Amino acid sequence: MSEAPALTVRGVSKSYGGVTVLHSASLTVPAGHVMALAGENGAGKSTLLKIVSGQVRPDSGEVHVYGTQLTQHDPISARRLGVAIVPQELAPYPDLTIYENIFVGREIRNRAGVLDRPEMAKQAREMLDVFELDIDSRWQMNRLSVALVQIVEIAKATTWGARVLLLDEPTSAIPDHEVGRLYSVVHRLREQGVAMMYTTHRMAEIQELADSVAVLRDGHLVFESDIAGADEATIVHAMVGRDMEALFPGQTISTGPVRLEVRDLQVIRGGPSVSFEVRQGEILGIGGLVGGGRTEIIEAVFGVRRSYDGTITIDGEPLERNRIDATIRRGVAFVPEDRKGAGLVPSRSVLDNGSLPHLRSFTLGGWIRPLVRRNAVEKATASVNLKCRGLGQLVGTLSGGNQQKVVLARWLTQEGCVLLLDEPTRGVDVGARGEIYRIIRDLASYGLAVVFVSSDMPELIGLSHRVLVVRAGKIVGELDREALDLSDAQEQIFRLASGQTLDVFGEQVVCTG
Amino acid sequence: MAEVPVKAGEPGGKKLLQFDKQRTTNLLLRNLMALVVIAVAVYFTIVRPQFATTANMRTILIAAAPFALIALGQTLVILTGGIDLSVGSIVALSAMTSAAIIVDHPERMVLGVIAGVVVGLLAGLVSGVVVAYINVAPFVATLGMLSVASGLAYAIGRGAPINGLPVEWGLIANTRFLGVQVPVLVMIAGFIVLGVIMTRTSFGMRIYAVGGNRTAAEVAGVNVRGILTSVYAISGALAGMSGVILSSRVISAAPYLGKGYELGAIAAVVIGGASLTGGRGTVWGTMLGLFLIQTLNNGLDILVVPAYWQTVISGILIVSAVAVDMVAAKRSSG
């Protein structure tokens, strides 16, 4: 190992379309050192990793790997310097074998020039042995659980000599009982002198794995410390770092009769069912771990996800399930988690996007009434304080917060009765976040029944009148406003969400560790 | 932040100025095709004055008409992110269907016309259902329909063209109304009707939404499958109309009529600035693309450029048009 630290990031900045996602970040990771990169969604963690791995070109700043500057900002150059990244969304070739996945792009050939499969299988086997995995390298990739796929990815990255390994949310998709497997891989690589930087939401994981921790908030590196000098409270404070009181002013809850009633709704055929009700003016939060079945519930209520059994009643009248258009006509609005993928048509204008869900109300026999439409959309966008250059601006060119406002506003052209939101502030900067909270509260006070799913604890606790906790598709707990005001609310929710028994995940475990 | 509230208008920071410049560039790029069409026409007029005669304009228009109908249908399909390869053989199938009816029942002209269009509509409908409800890729579904329709066209004539149609059948394509041939009127009407549909109706807006982001359209309550089915049905019906017009022009029908027209139509749509991934493109753009191709073919004919060189030129043209489009897209996004 040379004298220079494994990874040096100096004054790196990046902005997208006028929004700065990274403000002059600098940090250093020595060889054999594990740095946790903490921060909320949209804090700039992934952008930083992408810059280091050459996927994104920084606007300014430098990246050095063992003293050599990354000059060409492309993945191949970064890889040549020894930087490997295991992305959050893994993209293996599911129908190829493990060894084929490992050797793709640098296949071993025998003297005749054809693939030397036995040799590749053998070498792959040795790699997996290093991590004490009892799996056959000739298995098809799709037999492996997410954790194992991840480890295969890591094996692949390290065997071509990666000296700086970046892991983006490595544990987000792994059930608890498999996390240990990943931990031991990380420990082993640290012994070999690999420098690692990884992003995570999980506090316990930082304490367990990292040598140091850096916290990003809204693109600023706000905290950096050895793990000894950073307890959980300090890290959380650095991550959140905003005045909770200002974002979530005192709640005055005045609820009316039940607007939305869900009875025995079954999302998976033969699976668990859920029942709950939401009153007029009430904001109901749904908490739980990612993959715990929260999103599925509100998607099924709206009809984008098929439900198999149960009844949904709105204002006392039953709703036809699995019919989005009928649901919309009954005044139900839905703001999906994946704003770009499921919420907006980026190639169309604010006007078109704003009028899409309630298009029927702006037309006469199929003909759009331009004035009626323009007025309604203008009013709706003004009510959410949308900042745009005009209704003709393409939605794809708006900032994340403003896009989310369009997703909200398009439901406000008509009077509604139920508002469903999935992760309403994901990827939204703090300023716009406060506004979105205000809009949600206003809508509730006008008499809407609001249901929202969130992974953001302060948001869940601060915004909700009542919280349901979901685990493995079932409602496992409920906290009312009083319980939410207690100081251990977050802990309570987390305990309910993670559960005591770990075998609830129905995992396909194919190996012994 | 240089973003300003909805209503507030003109002046702003530096950023706004930059946007205006960008907008001008975009405007230029967007109208580039119109300028190119004009430039090409001016060039031909200068080198060969007979290009700009009324007679030649008529030739261009009448040659463009059957293509125009197909290209219009193709525009709708491409806007949803699909493609319709079957239109060429639907032209043949419709022409053969009409001709088979007329040759036996010379008095039932109207039935002949309707049958031709309806056959096209049905063929398109089948493709649409297969694409929308069985989720077969549009390329594959319409490739299948290309083969089926072509086979049926041959079957109707037992492998041979149908001749000996009554002279009156030729009246459809050759009658003039206010000095303009009927097919040209149909083409103009087609452009206007579809142009209006795409910009003024909820149907048009939903087509754009489905092509721009299918999932988002679904979440917004759009009947995506219905939209998909109808664009293929419309495309088929327009191809049927085109088949009727073509067979009327030559007062006969052949099973190889319209062969390869689908590619010409796709070229016109793409040159007109539509994106093959859907959501972007206009009827106006398709019209320009179509007239660029037609003007060029006509002008090169007048210059006595051999057909094979014409093919080379139109190939280069298609790729250049899309290349320009990519540059424009990059500018407006970056």
Image (cartoon, rainbow, N blue to C red):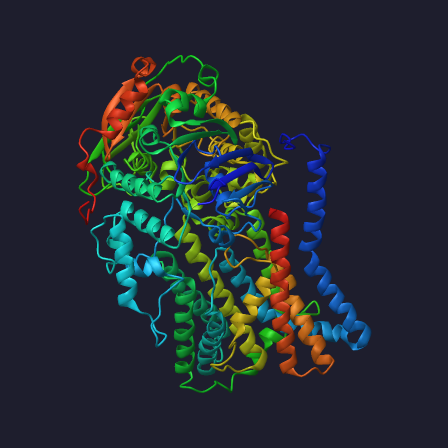
Looking at the image, can residue A391 be seen? yes
In what quadrant of the picture does the N terminus of chain A appear?
top left
Residue B29 pos. (x, y %):
68, 55
How many tags in the picture? 0
Instruction: Between residue A38 and residue A110, name the one nearer to us.
Output: A110
Q: Quadrant of residue A94?
A: bottom left
**Residue A507 position (above or below residue A476):** below
**Residue A135 position (above or below residue A408):** below
Residue A501 pos. (x, y %):
17, 32
Q: Quadrant of residue A171?
A: top left
Residue A292 pos. (x, y %):
27, 35
Looking at the image, can residue B53 be seen? no
**Residue B205 position (above or below residue B15):** below
Instruction: Between residue A453 and residue A190, name the one nearer to us.
Output: A190
**Residue B175 position (above or below residue A464):** below
Instruction: Between residue A153 and residue B99, name the one nearer to us.
Output: A153
Residue B32 pos. (x, y %):
70, 58
Please state if B2 lies on the left or on the right of A83 as rendered. Answer: right
Please state if A202 lies on the left or on the right of B248 as rendered. Answer: left
Instruction: Between residue B272 and residue A196, name the one nearer to us.
Output: A196
Please state if B322 lies on the left or on the right of A400 as rendered. Answer: right
Please state if B104 lies on the left or on the right of B245 as rendered. Answer: left
In what quadrant of the picture does the C terminus of chain A appear?
top left
